[in-house]
Amino acid sequence: MPRRLAGMLAALLTLGVQAPRTADAMVRPAVLAGTAAAAEPETAAGTEATTMKSDDASRDFDFWMGAWKIHNRRLRVRLRGGTTWDEFEATAVARPLLGGVGNEDVFRMDGDSGYTGMSFRFFDKATRRWSIYWADSRKGTLEPPVVGSFSGDTGVFEGTDTFEGRTIRVRYTWSRVTTPTPRWEQAFSDDGGETWETNWVMDMTRDVDIGARDFPVVELRRYVIKPGERERFARCFDGYFPEAFQQTGAIAFGQFLERKNDTWFAWLRGFPNLDARAEMNAAFYDSAVWKEHAAEMNDRMVDSDNVLLLRPLAPGRGLPVLPTADLATEAEGPAGVAVLHVFAVKPGAVEAAARRAEDAFAAYRSAGAREAGVLVTLDVPNNFPRLPIRTDGPYLVWVGIVKDDPGLARLAHLAERAARSLEAEGLLRGTPELVVLDPTRRSRLRWRPEWN
Protein backbone atom coordinates (compact mmCIF):
# COMPACT_ATOMS: atom_id res chain seq x y z
CA MET A 1 0.00 0.00 0.00
CA PRO A 2 1.91 3.12 -1.12
CA ARG A 3 1.95 6.00 1.35
CA ARG A 4 3.51 9.45 1.47
CA LEU A 5 6.39 9.55 3.93
CA ALA A 6 4.88 12.48 5.83
CA GLY A 7 1.81 10.46 6.66
CA MET A 8 3.44 7.10 7.16
CA LEU A 9 3.94 7.10 10.93
CA ALA A 10 0.45 8.36 11.65
CA ALA A 11 -1.01 5.64 9.48
CA LEU A 12 1.18 2.96 11.02
CA LEU A 13 0.25 3.87 14.56
CA THR A 14 -3.41 3.29 13.86
CA LEU A 15 -2.73 -0.32 12.91
CA GLY A 16 -1.35 -2.60 15.22
CA VAL A 17 2.65 -6.57 15.79
CA GLN A 18 5.40 -6.74 18.37
CA ALA A 19 3.41 -7.17 21.57
CA PRO A 20 3.32 -4.19 23.92
CA ARG A 21 5.77 -4.56 26.75
CA THR A 22 4.00 -2.31 29.23
CA ALA A 23 1.77 -3.85 31.86
CA ASP A 24 -1.36 -2.06 30.69
CA ALA A 25 -0.92 -2.83 27.00
CA MET A 26 -0.64 -6.62 26.82
CA VAL A 27 2.97 -7.58 26.07
CA ARG A 28 4.45 -6.85 22.75
CA PRO A 29 3.81 -9.79 20.36
CA ALA A 30 6.53 -11.17 18.22
CA VAL A 31 8.74 -9.06 16.13
CA LEU A 32 6.22 -9.70 13.47
CA ALA A 33 6.39 -8.16 10.09
CA GLY A 34 3.42 -7.55 7.82
CA THR A 35 0.71 -5.44 6.40
CA ALA A 36 -2.74 -6.07 5.16
CA ALA A 37 -1.44 -5.45 1.66
CA ALA A 38 0.82 -8.49 1.70
CA ALA A 39 0.16 -11.39 -0.63
CA GLU A 40 -1.40 -14.40 1.06
CA PRO A 41 -0.27 -17.76 -0.31
CA GLU A 42 -2.99 -20.27 -1.13
CA THR A 43 -0.74 -23.29 -1.49
CA ALA A 44 1.91 -24.90 0.63
CA ALA A 45 4.53 -23.59 -1.75
CA GLY A 46 5.19 -20.79 0.69
CA THR A 47 6.57 -23.26 3.22
CA GLU A 48 9.38 -24.22 0.88
CA ALA A 49 10.82 -20.73 1.13
CA THR A 50 11.32 -21.20 4.88
CA THR A 51 13.90 -23.91 4.32
CA MET A 52 16.45 -21.57 2.76
CA LYS A 53 18.28 -18.61 4.26
CA SER A 54 20.42 -16.17 2.33
CA ASP A 55 23.95 -15.21 3.38
CA ASP A 56 22.93 -11.58 2.79
CA ALA A 57 22.00 -10.30 6.27
CA SER A 58 19.62 -7.74 4.78
CA ARG A 59 17.46 -10.70 3.76
CA ASP A 60 17.33 -12.31 7.21
CA PHE A 61 13.56 -11.90 7.41
CA ASP A 62 12.72 -13.16 3.94
CA PHE A 63 11.38 -16.32 5.60
CA TRP A 64 8.75 -14.24 7.38
CA MET A 65 7.11 -12.65 4.34
CA GLY A 66 3.52 -13.73 3.70
CA ALA A 67 0.67 -14.98 5.87
CA TRP A 68 0.93 -16.99 9.08
CA LYS A 69 -1.17 -18.67 11.74
CA ILE A 70 0.23 -18.23 15.25
CA HIS A 71 -0.28 -20.26 18.41
CA ASN A 72 0.55 -18.06 21.41
CA ARG A 73 1.56 -18.93 24.98
CA ARG A 74 1.75 -15.83 27.17
CA LEU A 75 2.72 -15.65 30.85
CA ARG A 76 -0.15 -14.05 32.71
CA VAL A 77 1.99 -12.30 35.38
CA ARG A 78 5.46 -11.09 34.48
CA LEU A 79 8.58 -10.56 36.61
CA ARG A 80 6.74 -11.71 39.73
CA GLY A 81 7.34 -15.44 39.62
CA GLY A 82 4.18 -16.23 37.65
CA THR A 83 3.64 -19.76 36.35
CA THR A 84 0.20 -19.50 34.70
CA TRP A 85 0.20 -19.31 30.91
CA ASP A 86 -2.64 -18.18 28.64
CA GLU A 87 -2.95 -19.72 25.18
CA PHE A 88 -4.68 -18.16 22.17
CA GLU A 89 -4.56 -17.99 18.39
CA ALA A 90 -3.64 -15.12 16.09
CA THR A 91 -2.65 -14.37 12.51
CA ALA A 92 0.00 -12.22 10.90
CA VAL A 93 0.76 -10.96 7.42
CA ALA A 94 4.20 -9.62 6.49
CA ARG A 95 5.64 -7.76 3.52
CA PRO A 96 8.97 -6.16 2.56
CA LEU A 97 9.69 -2.43 2.59
CA LEU A 98 12.39 -0.20 1.10
CA GLY A 99 13.49 -2.71 -1.49
CA GLY A 100 14.00 -5.40 1.11
CA VAL A 101 16.08 -3.58 3.75
CA GLY A 102 12.93 -3.18 5.83
CA ASN A 103 9.71 -5.02 6.44
CA GLU A 104 6.43 -4.65 8.29
CA ASP A 105 3.73 -6.96 9.59
CA VAL A 106 0.25 -6.84 11.08
CA PHE A 107 -0.61 -9.13 14.00
CA ARG A 108 -4.29 -9.80 14.77
CA MET A 109 -5.65 -11.75 17.71
CA ASP A 110 -8.47 -14.13 16.85
CA GLY A 111 -11.85 -13.50 18.41
CA ASP A 112 -13.63 -10.28 19.28
CA SER A 113 -10.87 -8.42 21.14
CA GLY A 114 -10.08 -6.22 18.16
CA TYR A 115 -6.43 -6.15 19.23
CA THR A 116 -3.94 -5.53 16.44
CA GLY A 117 -0.26 -4.76 16.45
CA MET A 118 2.30 -3.82 13.86
CA SER A 119 6.06 -4.20 13.77
CA PHE A 120 8.63 -2.51 11.59
CA ARG A 121 12.17 -3.73 10.98
CA PHE A 122 15.00 -1.85 9.36
CA PHE A 123 18.45 -3.17 8.44
CA ASP A 124 21.41 -0.84 9.06
CA LYS A 125 23.83 -1.54 6.23
CA ALA A 126 26.73 0.04 8.14
CA THR A 127 26.38 -1.94 11.38
CA ARG A 128 24.65 -4.91 9.69
CA ARG A 129 22.14 -5.04 12.51
CA TRP A 130 18.35 -4.88 12.62
CA SER A 131 16.27 -2.39 14.60
CA ILE A 132 12.75 -3.57 15.36
CA TYR A 133 9.91 -1.25 16.38
CA TRP A 134 6.38 -1.97 17.61
CA ALA A 135 3.04 -0.16 17.77
CA ASP A 136 -0.40 -1.44 18.72
CA SER A 137 -4.07 -0.50 18.74
CA ARG A 138 -4.17 -0.05 22.51
CA LYS A 139 -1.45 2.56 22.97
CA GLY A 140 -0.94 4.11 19.55
CA THR A 141 2.73 4.89 20.24
CA LEU A 142 5.93 3.61 18.68
CA GLU A 143 7.88 1.57 21.26
CA PRO A 144 11.69 1.81 21.65
CA PRO A 145 13.49 -0.60 19.34
CA VAL A 146 15.25 -3.86 20.05
CA VAL A 147 18.48 -4.27 18.07
CA GLY A 148 20.40 -7.34 16.99
CA SER A 149 21.25 -9.84 14.28
CA PHE A 150 21.12 -13.48 13.25
CA SER A 151 23.72 -16.18 13.69
CA GLY A 152 22.69 -19.16 11.61
CA ASP A 153 18.97 -19.69 12.00
CA THR A 154 18.73 -17.89 15.36
CA GLY A 155 18.30 -14.16 15.78
CA VAL A 156 18.67 -12.29 19.10
CA PHE A 157 17.51 -8.69 19.53
CA GLU A 158 17.75 -6.66 22.75
CA GLY A 159 16.74 -3.24 23.98
CA THR A 160 15.85 -1.16 27.02
CA ASP A 161 12.30 -0.30 28.04
CA THR A 162 10.22 0.37 31.13
CA PHE A 163 7.83 -2.06 32.80
CA GLU A 164 5.61 -1.11 35.73
CA GLY A 165 7.71 1.99 36.30
CA ARG A 166 11.14 0.33 36.30
CA THR A 167 13.83 -0.01 33.67
CA ILE A 168 14.15 -3.47 32.15
CA ARG A 169 15.93 -5.23 29.34
CA VAL A 170 13.84 -6.83 26.61
CA ARG A 171 15.02 -9.69 24.41
CA TYR A 172 13.42 -11.20 21.32
CA THR A 173 14.68 -14.54 20.04
CA TRP A 174 13.80 -15.93 16.62
CA SER A 175 14.63 -19.62 16.08
CA ARG A 176 13.85 -22.45 13.63
CA VAL A 177 13.65 -19.87 10.83
CA THR A 178 14.91 -22.37 8.23
CA THR A 179 11.98 -24.69 8.98
CA PRO A 180 8.26 -24.37 8.11
CA THR A 181 7.52 -23.69 11.82
CA PRO A 182 9.57 -20.72 13.06
CA ARG A 183 9.37 -19.68 16.71
CA TRP A 184 9.57 -16.29 18.42
CA GLU A 185 10.13 -15.72 22.14
CA GLN A 186 10.08 -12.62 24.31
CA ALA A 187 11.95 -12.38 27.62
CA PHE A 188 12.34 -9.63 30.26
CA SER A 189 15.22 -8.99 32.63
CA ASP A 190 15.06 -6.64 35.63
CA ASP A 191 18.66 -7.19 36.70
CA GLY A 192 20.51 -5.83 33.69
CA GLY A 193 20.52 -9.10 31.77
CA GLU A 194 21.89 -11.37 34.50
CA THR A 195 18.72 -13.46 34.45
CA TRP A 196 15.82 -13.62 32.02
CA GLU A 197 12.18 -14.63 32.28
CA THR A 198 10.50 -15.80 29.05
CA ASN A 199 6.94 -14.45 29.00
CA TRP A 200 5.67 -14.99 25.45
CA VAL A 201 6.19 -17.82 22.94
CA MET A 202 4.78 -17.86 19.42
CA ASP A 203 4.82 -20.90 17.15
CA MET A 204 4.04 -20.11 13.50
CA THR A 205 2.69 -22.16 10.63
CA ARG A 206 1.81 -21.01 7.14
CA ASP A 207 -1.77 -19.78 6.71
CA VAL A 208 -2.58 -21.53 3.44
CA ASP A 209 -6.24 -22.57 3.78
CA ILE A 210 -8.35 -19.53 3.07
CA GLY A 211 -11.47 -21.66 3.26
CA ALA A 212 -10.84 -22.21 6.97
CA ARG A 213 -10.75 -18.50 7.84
CA ASP A 214 -13.57 -16.39 9.19
CA PHE A 215 -14.63 -13.12 7.58
CA PRO A 216 -17.36 -11.88 9.95
CA VAL A 217 -17.54 -8.30 8.67
CA VAL A 218 -19.46 -8.35 5.39
CA GLU A 219 -20.33 -5.73 2.80
CA LEU A 220 -23.34 -6.44 0.57
CA ARG A 221 -22.70 -4.11 -2.36
CA ARG A 222 -25.32 -3.51 -5.07
CA TYR A 223 -24.27 -1.34 -8.02
CA VAL A 224 -26.33 0.22 -10.77
CA ILE A 225 -24.48 -0.08 -14.08
CA LYS A 226 -25.11 1.92 -17.24
CA PRO A 227 -27.51 0.21 -19.68
CA GLY A 228 -25.72 -2.26 -21.90
CA GLU A 229 -22.52 -2.20 -19.83
CA ARG A 230 -23.24 -4.77 -17.11
CA GLU A 231 -21.79 -7.85 -18.85
CA ARG A 232 -18.53 -6.10 -19.61
CA PHE A 233 -18.41 -4.67 -16.08
CA ALA A 234 -18.81 -8.18 -14.66
CA ARG A 235 -16.10 -9.64 -16.92
CA CYS A 236 -13.68 -6.88 -15.92
CA PHE A 237 -14.54 -7.30 -12.24
CA ASP A 238 -13.96 -11.06 -12.43
CA GLY A 239 -10.70 -10.60 -14.29
CA TYR A 240 -9.13 -7.84 -12.23
CA PHE A 241 -10.26 -7.91 -8.62
CA PRO A 242 -10.93 -11.19 -6.72
CA GLU A 243 -7.24 -11.97 -6.17
CA ALA A 244 -6.48 -8.30 -5.54
CA PHE A 245 -8.96 -8.29 -2.65
CA GLN A 246 -7.44 -11.50 -1.35
CA GLN A 247 -3.96 -10.02 -1.47
CA THR A 248 -5.10 -7.42 1.07
CA GLY A 249 -6.47 -10.10 3.40
CA ALA A 250 -10.13 -9.59 2.41
CA ILE A 251 -12.28 -11.98 0.37
CA ALA A 252 -14.84 -11.69 -2.40
CA PHE A 253 -17.43 -14.31 -1.41
CA GLY A 254 -19.24 -13.96 -4.70
CA GLN A 255 -20.34 -11.59 -7.45
CA PHE A 256 -23.64 -11.69 -9.30
CA LEU A 257 -26.01 -10.29 -11.92
CA GLU A 258 -29.42 -9.43 -10.48
CA ARG A 259 -32.27 -10.98 -12.47
CA LYS A 260 -35.04 -8.49 -11.74
CA ASN A 261 -32.85 -5.46 -12.40
CA ASP A 262 -30.93 -5.87 -15.64
CA THR A 263 -28.54 -3.03 -14.84
CA TRP A 264 -27.71 -4.18 -11.30
CA PHE A 265 -24.50 -5.94 -10.24
CA ALA A 266 -24.15 -7.27 -6.67
CA TRP A 267 -21.28 -8.72 -4.71
CA LEU A 268 -20.31 -9.73 -1.19
CA ARG A 269 -16.97 -8.88 0.37
CA GLY A 270 -15.68 -10.05 3.77
CA PHE A 271 -13.08 -8.88 6.28
CA PRO A 272 -11.52 -10.54 9.36
CA ASN A 273 -12.70 -7.72 11.66
CA LEU A 274 -13.86 -4.12 11.58
CA ASP A 275 -10.40 -2.56 11.86
CA ALA A 276 -9.25 -4.76 9.00
CA ARG A 277 -12.08 -3.35 6.85
CA ALA A 278 -10.50 0.10 6.99
CA GLU A 279 -6.96 -1.18 6.47
CA MET A 280 -7.78 -3.58 3.65
CA ASN A 281 -10.07 -1.22 1.78
CA ALA A 282 -7.33 1.41 1.93
CA ALA A 283 -4.82 -1.16 0.68
CA PHE A 284 -7.02 -2.07 -2.27
CA TYR A 285 -8.25 1.39 -3.30
CA ASP A 286 -4.72 2.79 -3.08
CA SER A 287 -3.28 -0.16 -5.01
CA ALA A 288 -1.87 -0.14 -8.51
CA VAL A 289 -4.57 -2.60 -9.63
CA TRP A 290 -7.43 -0.28 -8.69
CA LYS A 291 -5.68 2.84 -9.95
CA GLU A 292 -5.14 1.21 -13.32
CA HIS A 293 -8.81 0.24 -13.75
CA ALA A 294 -10.69 2.78 -11.60
CA ALA A 295 -11.61 5.17 -14.40
CA GLU A 296 -12.87 2.34 -16.62
CA MET A 297 -14.97 0.76 -13.86
CA ASN A 298 -16.31 3.99 -12.39
CA ASP A 299 -17.34 5.21 -15.83
CA ARG A 300 -19.67 2.21 -16.16
CA MET A 301 -21.37 2.75 -12.78
CA VAL A 302 -24.38 4.98 -12.18
CA ASP A 303 -24.53 4.34 -8.42
CA SER A 304 -22.35 2.40 -5.97
CA ASP A 305 -23.66 3.62 -2.61
CA ASN A 306 -26.24 0.88 -1.96
CA VAL A 307 -24.14 -0.97 0.62
CA LEU A 308 -25.18 -2.85 3.75
CA LEU A 309 -22.54 -3.47 6.41
CA LEU A 310 -23.41 -6.80 8.02
CA ARG A 311 -22.28 -9.43 10.52
CA PRO A 312 -23.31 -13.05 11.15
CA LEU A 313 -26.50 -13.42 13.17
CA ALA A 314 -24.71 -15.92 15.41
CA PRO A 315 -21.59 -18.11 15.41
CA GLY A 316 -21.76 -20.55 12.53
CA ARG A 317 -24.09 -18.35 10.44
CA GLY A 318 -21.37 -16.45 8.58
CA LEU A 319 -20.69 -16.83 4.86
CA PRO A 320 -18.41 -19.67 3.73
CA VAL A 321 -15.39 -19.18 1.50
CA LEU A 322 -16.12 -21.70 -1.25
CA PRO A 323 -13.40 -22.86 -3.67
CA THR A 324 -12.56 -20.65 -6.59
CA ALA A 325 -14.34 -21.35 -9.87
CA ASP A 326 -12.64 -23.87 -12.14
CA LEU A 327 -13.10 -22.30 -15.55
CA ALA A 328 -11.71 -25.39 -17.26
CA THR A 329 -14.38 -27.76 -15.92
CA GLU A 330 -17.19 -25.19 -15.66
CA ALA A 331 -17.02 -24.15 -19.29
CA GLU A 332 -20.75 -23.45 -19.41
CA GLY A 333 -20.56 -21.09 -16.46
CA PRO A 334 -21.32 -21.44 -12.77
CA ALA A 335 -24.22 -23.61 -11.68
CA GLY A 336 -27.06 -22.58 -9.45
CA VAL A 337 -28.85 -19.42 -8.42
CA ALA A 338 -28.00 -17.33 -5.36
CA VAL A 339 -30.81 -15.76 -3.36
CA LEU A 340 -30.93 -12.99 -0.78
CA HIS A 341 -34.02 -12.58 1.37
CA VAL A 342 -33.69 -9.08 2.81
CA PHE A 343 -35.91 -8.09 5.74
CA ALA A 344 -36.12 -4.44 6.83
CA VAL A 345 -36.63 -4.95 10.56
CA LYS A 346 -38.03 -2.47 13.03
CA PRO A 347 -35.46 -1.00 15.45
CA GLY A 348 -34.99 -3.25 18.45
CA ALA A 349 -36.75 -6.19 16.78
CA VAL A 350 -33.82 -7.97 15.10
CA GLU A 351 -33.60 -10.83 17.58
CA ALA A 352 -37.36 -11.35 17.61
CA ALA A 353 -37.55 -11.27 13.81
CA ALA A 354 -34.63 -13.67 13.50
CA ARG A 355 -36.25 -16.14 15.92
CA ARG A 356 -39.55 -15.89 14.08
CA ALA A 357 -37.82 -16.37 10.71
CA GLU A 358 -35.97 -19.53 11.74
CA ASP A 359 -38.94 -21.73 10.82
CA ALA A 360 -38.94 -20.17 7.35
CA PHE A 361 -35.20 -20.65 6.96
CA ALA A 362 -35.55 -24.29 7.96
CA ALA A 363 -38.27 -24.67 5.32
CA TYR A 364 -35.95 -23.16 2.69
CA ARG A 365 -33.33 -25.78 3.56
CA SER A 366 -35.87 -28.60 3.51
CA ALA A 367 -36.93 -27.48 0.04
CA GLY A 368 -33.39 -28.05 -1.25
CA ALA A 369 -31.79 -24.63 -0.77
CA ARG A 370 -28.26 -24.46 0.65
CA GLU A 371 -28.09 -21.83 3.38
CA ALA A 372 -24.88 -19.84 2.95
CA GLY A 373 -25.42 -17.56 5.92
CA VAL A 374 -27.75 -15.39 7.96
CA LEU A 375 -26.55 -11.83 8.44
CA VAL A 376 -27.74 -8.77 10.34
CA THR A 377 -26.80 -5.10 10.27
CA LEU A 378 -23.45 -4.29 11.90
CA ASP A 379 -24.47 -1.06 13.59
CA VAL A 380 -21.18 0.82 13.87
CA PRO A 381 -19.82 4.06 12.39
CA ASN A 382 -18.36 3.76 8.91
CA ASN A 383 -14.61 3.43 9.46
CA PHE A 384 -13.83 3.82 5.75
CA PRO A 385 -15.84 6.89 4.70
CA ARG A 386 -14.45 6.82 1.15
CA LEU A 387 -17.05 4.09 0.63
CA PRO A 388 -20.51 5.10 1.93
CA ILE A 389 -22.72 2.58 3.69
CA ARG A 390 -26.45 2.67 4.34
CA THR A 391 -27.65 3.82 7.75
CA ASP A 392 -31.35 2.97 7.35
CA GLY A 393 -31.15 -0.40 9.15
CA PRO A 394 -31.50 -2.71 10.82
CA TYR A 395 -31.72 -5.50 8.25
CA LEU A 396 -31.87 -9.26 8.47
CA VAL A 397 -30.46 -11.00 5.38
CA TRP A 398 -30.75 -14.71 4.55
CA VAL A 399 -28.23 -15.84 1.92
CA GLY A 400 -28.74 -19.11 0.07
CA ILE A 401 -28.11 -21.02 -3.13
CA VAL A 402 -30.52 -23.21 -5.09
CA LYS A 403 -29.62 -25.70 -7.79
CA ASP A 404 -31.88 -24.46 -10.59
CA ASP A 405 -35.00 -22.50 -11.51
CA PRO A 406 -37.43 -25.16 -10.21
CA GLY A 407 -35.64 -24.95 -6.86
CA LEU A 408 -35.92 -21.17 -7.05
CA ALA A 409 -39.67 -21.42 -7.65
CA ARG A 410 -40.07 -23.56 -4.53
CA LEU A 411 -38.03 -21.14 -2.48
CA ALA A 412 -39.91 -18.10 -3.79
CA HIS A 413 -43.23 -19.63 -2.70
CA LEU A 414 -41.91 -20.25 0.80
CA ALA A 415 -40.37 -16.78 0.94
CA GLU A 416 -43.73 -15.14 0.19
CA ARG A 417 -45.31 -17.04 3.06
CA ALA A 418 -42.49 -16.06 5.44
CA ALA A 419 -42.79 -12.41 4.44
CA ARG A 420 -46.53 -12.35 5.14
CA SER A 421 -46.01 -13.95 8.53
CA LEU A 422 -43.36 -11.48 9.69
CA GLU A 423 -45.31 -8.51 8.37
CA ALA A 424 -48.42 -9.69 10.20
CA GLU A 425 -46.52 -9.80 13.48
CA GLY A 426 -45.46 -6.17 13.14
CA LEU A 427 -41.73 -6.90 13.13
CA LEU A 428 -40.88 -5.29 9.78
CA ARG A 429 -40.62 -1.76 8.42
CA GLY A 430 -41.60 -2.77 4.90
CA THR A 431 -42.11 -5.62 2.48
CA PRO A 432 -39.14 -8.04 2.37
CA GLU A 433 -37.12 -8.17 -0.83
CA LEU A 434 -36.24 -11.45 -2.53
CA VAL A 435 -33.11 -10.76 -4.59
CA VAL A 436 -32.39 -13.39 -7.27
CA LEU A 437 -28.77 -13.50 -8.38
CA ASP A 438 -26.98 -15.31 -11.21
CA PRO A 439 -23.34 -15.96 -10.23
CA THR A 440 -20.68 -14.57 -12.55
CA ARG A 441 -18.11 -16.89 -14.09
CA ARG A 442 -15.70 -16.55 -11.16
CA SER A 443 -18.10 -16.23 -8.24
CA ARG A 444 -17.17 -18.46 -5.31
CA LEU A 445 -20.79 -18.56 -4.13
CA ARG A 446 -22.46 -20.91 -6.59
CA TRP A 447 -23.97 -24.41 -6.61
CA ARG A 448 -21.32 -27.03 -5.91
CA PRO A 449 -21.27 -30.42 -7.75
CA GLU A 450 -21.03 -32.33 -4.45
CA TRP A 451 -24.40 -30.89 -3.40
CA ASN A 452 -26.23 -32.74 -6.19
Image (spheres, rainbow, N blue to C red):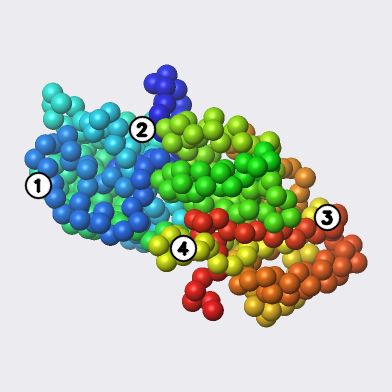
Q: Nearer the viewer, mark 3 or mark 4?
A: 4
Quick one: label 4 or label 2, which is nearer the N terminus? Answer: 2
Marks 3 and 4 sit apart, C-alpha to C-alpha, by 44 Å
Instruction: Give coordinates of residue 277: x percent, y percent.
Output: 53, 43
Instruction: Give coordinates of residue 157: x percent, y percent.
Output: 20, 39
Residue at (63%, 53%) from the top-left corner? 257
Q: Tag 4: Cα neighbours inside 10 Å, few (<14), some, or many (≥20)?
A: few
Quick one: label 3 or label 4, which is nearer the N terminus? Answer: 4
Q: Tag 2: Cα neighbours inside 10 Å, few (<14), some, or many (≥20)?
A: many
**In screen coordinates, is 405 left or right of 346?**
left
Q: Which residue is mark 3?
A: 346
Q: Which residue is mark 2?
A: 143
Quick one: label 1 or label 3, which is nearer the N terminus? Answer: 1
Marks 3 and 2 sit apart, C-alpha to C-alpha, by 47 Å
Marks 4 and 1 sit apart, C-alpha to C-alpha, by 51 Å
Q: Nearer the viewer, mark 2 or mark 1?
A: 1
Callout 4, which amino acid? Ala
Callout 3, which amino acid? Lys
Quick one: label 2 or label 1, which is nearer the N terminus? Answer: 2
Disc 4 element: loop
Q: Which residue is mark 1?
A: 152
Which mark is on residue 331? 4
Marks 2 and 1 sit apart, C-alpha to C-alpha, by 27 Å
Callout 2, which amino acid? Glu
Can residue 396 be seen here? The reply is: no
**In screen coordinates, is 411 left or right of 213?**
right
70 relative to 366, above or below: above
Which mark is on residue 306? none
